[in-house]
Image: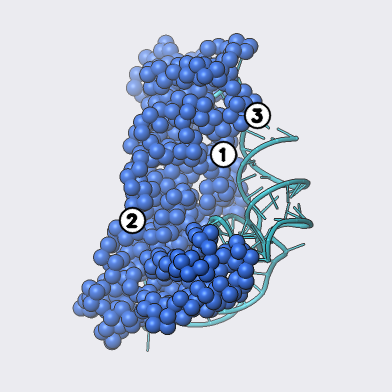
Chain colours: A blue, B cyan
Amino acid sequence: MIKSQLKERVDACFARGVREGLWSAEAAGRYVLEVPRHEGQGDFSTNLALVVAGLEKRKPRDIAAQLAAMFSPEDELVVRVEIAGPGFVNFFLRDRVWSSVIPPVCAQGDRFGLENVGAGMKVMVEFVSANPTGPLSIGHGRNAILGDAIARLLEAVGYDVTREYYFNDAGRQMRVLGESTRARYLELLGLESNFPEDGYQGEYIYDIARSLIEEAGDGFRDADVVFFKDRAQAAIFDNINTTLRNIDVRFDTYFNEHTLYEKGLVDQVVADLREKDLVYEKDGATWFRSTQFGQDQDRVIIKSSGEPTYRLPDIAYHREKFRRGFEWMIDIFGSDHIATVPDVLAGIRALGCDDAKVKVILHQFVTLLKDGRQVKMSTRKATFITVDELLEDVGPDVLRFFYLMRKSDSQLEFDLDLARKQSQENPVYYVQYAHARLCSIERQARENGVVTPPAEAASLELLKEPEECVLLKTVAEYPSMIFGAAVDLAPHRVIFYLMNLAGLFHSYYNKHKVITDDARLTGARLCFCRALKTVLGNGLRVLGLRAPETM
RNA sequence: GCGCCCGUAGCUCAGCCGGAUAGAGCAUCGGACUUCGAAUCCGAGGGCCGGGGGUUCGAAUCCCUCCGGGCGCGCCA
């Protein structure tokens, strides 16, 4: 807000310099205005002179001086301009400008920080997309929370978001599920059973089998594998959806791979590729000439058995997303799917779609640290930890916060020992406590009959403690932080912002009193606190975290 | 062997399009509750940003190379 005002001024000065022949227009859009890292370097700093000098082979400090001269000492925003280091131009702003963020924050409330850069653009976030073969593991949990947070952020900046869960309830995987369930069912009845070699060994299969026995005793002993598959799938999907609801993750649409076959979309892809001479037959299989699209080898899309490989429906599915009118498609995958991504993108491109509109987020794995040691997990042996277990252990906010603390392409170590702690060292409570504390101050004021004045009527110019200025600057950065986190699909930045804001507030709180005998100062600080509470609350909620009034 | 990701404080990690003196949390040590909530605060120590080259006014950030770790490299999904 304040930054953009100053940026406009700098841009205007740059344009003026171009008109007056001080420099060429070449540097337009290439310099930046940013908050310097160190104190004494001003509130904002621009590298304009360095960029211009680099392009024109001139002395940076000369250019910096020309720029600095364009700001008058009576400027209402800038109190002082300095040239520093190799040629940075540092701007020092008048103290009172910072508190000008308070009225808009208070006026906008929940809506503060919402932008409309998306302008209603249709974007799909496809995530989780786990086939119903078992409960969600902690790896799926990361996928779910990440996708959900990204969807929330994109909505916050004006995109029209559809959350979709893509799944496949046919195929080999599901057949094995049916066989596993059938075997457990017969086993529990004391009948002859042969558990498949690569069957699902999890305890949940027994649970499903037990419920079938409760329902009909041995009445299903002659039922076929498809029956068991259907029943297992229904039970598991039910479980998955319950888990997702418990962690506050919702979907707009579920897309069954089967639909692609019903509508003939898979055959269509093959036909279209064939027409472009991008497929050929070899060894009884049908191959896609993916080498023509930068791949190291051609790929089979239809096996010699006549069954398609996974990448064919994947390509058809993504093409269908284009047809459904999505202009931006975000896929959240675990890093084990890395090999499929180039295939699908190549296929999309081969069909004439712009694969730049598909953005794949590959998140790394999650490891669990318990009692200071890594917990070994194996999907095959079903010794994995489920989202349900983790949720029961630490609760929804801790779960979400920890999942979002790391950027997606870092491996995530989930420190259970830290997550379980209900105090001090747990960063979730640190942030939530700041919010609760602000609520508490409001309550305290109310109980003492102190009214918070409207922000426009408060003496905001009294907010000139250094801690107040830093906090106000941070508040002012909130909208651009949200915007950046959204378009870069990086929710972890919001977490870091919140920890920083909470920390600044806690320090301030311990040093200064809000409610004092000075009525004007109290009024100003109560408005200040309302703004802080608003931003903290909005930041928590945009990630799907709760902002408690008491703890 | 090839592809992608990671390597920053004892541990877990930030650091956006290259910027001026390297950041946070946890852990460790030492302090602060008759005061709006101590789930808090203040202070201290701790770093050849994996190694080596290169690009340039300037590199944790970009390029090359090597080392170490993760994930992939199927007519499995």
Q: Nearer the viewer, mark 3 or mark 1?
A: 3
Q: Chain of mark 1?
A: A
Looking at numbered disc 1 in the image, what kind of residue is underneath it?
Ser
Q: Residue at x 56, y 47 (%)?
A: A409
Q: Position of residue A63 (x, y in %)?
A: 56, 72
Q: Nearer the viewer, mark 3 or mark 2?
A: 3
* Label 1 sits on residue: A335
Can you say which quadrant of the picture contains the C terminus of chain A? bottom left
Provide the secondary structure element on which disc 1 rests.
Answer: helix
- Residue A114 marker: 2
Looking at numbered disc 3 in the image, what kind of residue is underneath it?
Asp
Provide the secondary structure element on which disc 3 rests.
Answer: loop
Using the image as rendered, state which of residue A345 and residue A81 is in the foreground. A81
**3 or 2: tag closer to the N-terminus:** 2
Tags 3 and 1 both on a single chain: yes
Q: Residues within 10 Å of mark 2 (few under 14, many from 20)?
A: many
Q: Chain of mark 2?
A: A
- Residue A296 marker: 3
Q: Residues within 10 Å of mark 1 (few under 14, many from 20)?
A: some
**1 or 2: tag closer to the N-terminus:** 2
Tell me, yes or no, if residue A418 can be seen here: yes
